[in-house]
Amino acid sequence: MNNVLHKWFGNKSDKVEPNEVFHVAARERIYAVGDVHGRVDLLNRILELIARDVATHNDQRTPHIVFLGDYIDRGDNSREVLDVLIAVQKDLPPGSIRFLLGNHEAAALSFLKDPTGKAEWLRFGGLQTLLSYGVAPPKSNPTGPDLVAVADGLRAAMGGHIDFLMSHEHMYRSGDVLFVHAGLDPHMPLEAQTEEATLWGRSDFIEEGGFGGLRVVHGHYDAHEAVVTHNRICVDTGAYYSGRLTAMRLDDGEKLIVADVLDIT
């Protein structure tokens, strides 16, 4: 099976071990949200749907939201997305919402630090982010000074959004479930994971069907439907082009929650 089909349908070698059951921590109910990519309309809708779902439960579990990264780029409203996320963080109790770093945030931060060396970010979604902040894109074949000027303009426009992105975690664990943007390197111990695997997906994680001893919930690999296997869950449903943003609720069981642009009035 080629890599594209791996990403869409999972690896048929994913094996269910009869005695292997993965659960989040006993007192937690986690809502893991996939890649937003500048779709503030879908973000607002998924937050509404999560709030409704939280209200249907009356037990000892504490709800938590884990965003899996890639909030910016590609869609048209990266700035507005970060505004919403910061506002939600302020409104909710401390520790009840967690933000993981995605490769697009990492690339944007690298561009701000080294605009001439990391200009490739502009070619895979960064231009849309510039426009959302009112920063003019560079001209064709920009020089080093051109790129520095763009980075300076973006830095000034982003303000506190930069500190917000820099505060994001690389992974979060609850019980036997680990949340990360792109996946893990199955050949390396958990404490030795690198950004190449966790942010960029450069490992055999998809091909080998997961990471031993944990169920991994991630984004990064976009498809029209979520991928749910025994060992991993991918909730990146290509929000910026599909009009569908997906979350997964995990407690004693699991439930997909989908914000669809067709349902937004």
Image (cartoon, rainbow, N blue to C red):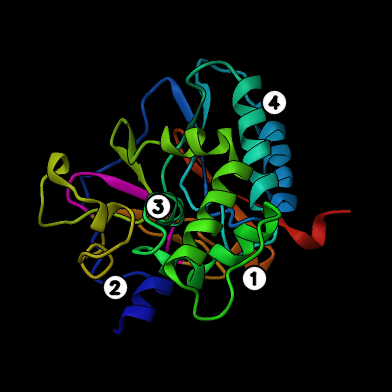
Q: Does dot 3 land on a helix, a strand or a loop? A: strand
Name above or below for residue 118 compared with residue 198: below
| Residue found 62% across the figure and 36% down from its top | 85
Q: How much space separates mark 3 and mark 4, taking CA atoms?
A: 25 Å
Q: In this view of the protein, can residue 135 be seen by the observer?
A: yes
Residue 196 lies, in percent from the top left, at: 24, 58
Residue position for label 1 = 241
- Is residue 217 magenta-colored? yes
Q: Nearer the viewer, mark 2 or mark 3?
A: 3
Dot 2 or dot 3, earlier in sequence: 2
* Number of dots carrying numbers: 4
Q: Amino acid at mark 3?
A: His
Residue 89 lies, in percent from the top left, at: 59, 26
- Is residue 33 magenta-colored? no
Residue 164 lies, in percent from the top left, at: 51, 34
Residue position for label 4 = 55
Residue 12 is marked as 2
Mostly what secondary structure, the magenta segment? loop
| Residue range highlighted in magenta | 211-221
Q: Tell me, yes or no, whether the two marked residues, 3 and 4, touch with CB atoms within 8 Å.
A: no
Q: Does dot 2 land on a helix, a strand or a loop? A: loop
Q: How much space separates mark 3 and mark 1, taking CA atoms?
A: 19 Å
Q: Quadrant of the N terminus?
A: bottom left
In the figure, is residue 57 to the left or right of 14? right
Residue 208's quadrant in the figure? Answer: bottom left
Who is closer to the viewer here, 196 or 228? 196
Crowdedness of circle 2 by 10 Å Cα count: few (<14), some, many (20+)?
few
